[in-house]
Image: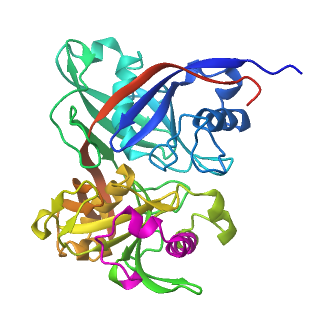
Amino acid sequence: MSFAPQIKIPATYMRGGTSKGVFFRLEDLPERAQTAGQARDQLLLRVIGSPDLYGKQIDGMGGATSSTSKTVILSKSSQPEHDVDYLFGQVSIDKAFVDWSGNCGNLTAAVGSFAISNGLVAADRIPENGICTVRIWQANIHKTIIAHVPVSHGQVQETGDFELDGVTFPAAEVQIEFLDPADDGEDGGAMFPTGNVVDTLDVPEIGTFQATLINAGIPTIFLNAEEIGYTGTELQDDINADSAALARFEKIRAYGALKMGLIQDISEAANRQHTPKVAFVSKPKSYTSSSGKQVTQSDTDLLVRALSMGKLHHAMMGTAAVAIGTAAAIPQTLVNLAAGGGEREAVRFGHPSGTLRVGAQALNENGQWVVKKAIMSRSARVLMEGWVRIPADSF
């Protein structure tokens, strides 16, 4: 019996924010995977090591969490006044599909660095020393993102003293601007798809809850922690070790997606794991983070816990942070009320690994809330570069 040989594909393994992923240049992918479709999805599944019924992704580059089962495809931008097109694929761990329905805000921090280092940004736009402004077209959601990447001696500077809760070692700070982050595309339409800043969400056999349903950064369902039986200080094991709780959250997520217009039937939620996210908020409280760091009540404006791909996230998704900042800036949302209400342009929120500050500028124009941009700081670093190998007959 003969077996197909392995092929090798140029790739870079990068950390961006509190996530890790495998980065590719579009032109480096095998020809049949350079266009969207089954071949591309099968290739990325094999690279990451999915589907893995053991839930470990041992035979691939994935780390068996929503934060580490990620892929990025980059190319010179097809859009005017942009440098790079950024396409993000969230790879399911135990199922054979790649979710292309949203962005990864954490890995966005690595996009600018990769683009500079791999010839996707024009040389005359890269300073010898200083900050390189990389104009990113986020192809999943059709939005512009600006990354401010430090450069030293003509090379991306990755080391520094910027500390990010959820990441062990300090690195160089990368400021990210999400321009016009509210979703005005085909999924969900307006920032508030129901037209309300707070809705009543009915979930059969689970209950009826207040919810803020928002399309900003990524479609997100915000709930009050106390209303669903939590304090807002929970860490990962408090939620992820409780299979019944995870099932409840998934049902809430599915009915929230239906109310937001993201799906037409509840059954569709199973194949749309990446979006929407579900998160719960509470007023500030003191707690001990997952690293043992003490977060006091005065350290934060509110607490937020968010689930991604069916599990409580160890820190906070970057796109969900945009949703948090946006919702906090709009009076009377559940996020705004948890932060004390009123008008604000920035919040510092507590998450399982510590705290994060995010800013957003909201305006009421003709009775509709709009957000011009949301801003946060992350960091990024190349972990490994070279080639990934997969069997030639796997896609």
**Location of residue 81 in the rendering, given as x and y in whole percent from the top left corner:** 38, 28
Q: In this rendering, is residue 45 above or below 153?
A: below
x 36%, y 15%: residue: 122
The quarter in which the C terminus is drawn is top right
User: From the viewer's perspective, is 83 left or right of 201?
Assistant: left
Depth check, front residue: 263 or 73:
73
**Location of residue 257 in the rendering, given as x and y in whole percent from the top left corner:** 55, 68
The span picked out in magenta is: 227-255
Q: Is residue 252 visible?
A: yes
The quarter in which the N terminus is drawn is top right
x 58%, y 34%: residue: 60
> Which color scheme did the rendering employ for the protein?
rainbow
Q: Residue furthest right?
A: 1
The answer to whether residue 305 is magenta is no
Q: In this rendering, is residue 374 above or below 45?
A: below
The answer to whether residue 254 is magenta is yes
Q: In this rendering, is residue 388 above or below 316?
A: above
**Location of residue 144 in the rendering, given as x and y in whole percent from the top left corner:** 38, 40
x 65%, y 71%: residue: 266
User: From the viewer's perspective, is 81 left or right of 248?
Assistant: left
